[in-house]
Image (cartoon, helix red, strand yellow):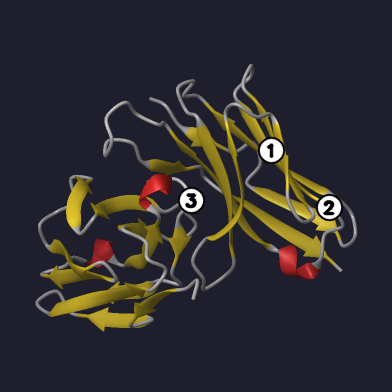
Amino acid sequence: GESVGLHLPTLSVQEGDNSIINCAYSNSASDYFIWYKQESGKGPQFIIDIRSNMDKRQGQRVTVLLNKTVKHLSLQIAATQPGDSAVYFCAENRGGTNFGNEKLTFGTGTRLTIIP
Amino acid sequence: DTEVTQTPKHLVMGMTNKKSLKCEQHMGHRAMYWYKQKAKKPPELMFVYSYEKLSINESVPSRFSPECPNSSLLNLHLHALQPEDSALYLCASSQVDSYNEKLFFGSGTQLSVL
């Protein structure tokens, strides 16, 4: 089956360092990707998104890279802070031809821990 | 107002109870979603409403009954649930031109079925 998966389930990073969270997807028809951050006891919070016609997009301290050739997505967080500790999910939307049939499918998630 | 508000935050119910989860947003979003999230797992889509009409039902058992009474409100009616239905239930909304893309999530209702 087609899935969105992550290479690493857990990641620990020293405060102030940069972190990279990776995500592999297998559906070549996916044309929209999004990263969410979920803190304990909260719902997923939007971080950044990217469409398949781009290979890089930057936000505040975050960058998403998309490599369609190898079906790989990454989230880079610069100068990590304690508040960045959370579970990070990538998700994809297939962008079906019939409106109403596509859905946002989440990957397994990576727990990022920032070490003070 | 960029919030999706869910009530209650916590709910404990017996298998014979009837309860409802409520979700409200005032962002003018015309697409609303219910997701179920088990511990340490990603959210899984249950239902999607677009313009107050059910557009996606992910083969959810009939003991879960969604309702969208107006463009700001989304309910999930629960009846005769099983212990395995215990989970975090998340509501989300989006603009229709971001249908199943950039979703805004509430904090969820943590449901325990005894």
Q: Report the side of B101 relative to A10 (left or right).
A: left
Q: Are marks 3 and 1 on the same chain?
A: no
Q: Are marks 1 and 2 on the same chain?
A: yes
Pointer 3 with pointer 2, Cβ within 8 A: no
Res B105 → quadrant? bottom left
Give the residue pinned by disc 1: A74
Give the residue pinned by disc 3: B102
**Amino acid type of disc 1?**
Ser
Pointer 3 with pointer 1, Cβ within 8 A: no
Residue B4: x and y, percent? 42, 72
Residue B35: x and y, percent? 34, 57
Q: Nearer the viewer, mark 3 or mark 1?
A: 3
Q: Residue at x 40, y 46 (%)?
A: B97
Q: Report the side of B36 relative to B76 (left or right).
A: right
Residue A17: x and y, percent? 89, 54
- Read off the chain for label 1: A
Label 1 Cα crowd, 10 Å radius (few <14 / some 14-19 / many 20+): some
Give the residue pinned by disc 2: A78
Q: Secondary structure at mark 1?
A: strand
Q: Split into 4 quadrants, where in the image is the C terminus of chain B?
A: bottom left
Q: CA distance from mark 1 to mark 2?
A: 13 Å
Q: Secondary structure at mark 3?
A: loop
**Amino acid type of disc 3?**
Lys
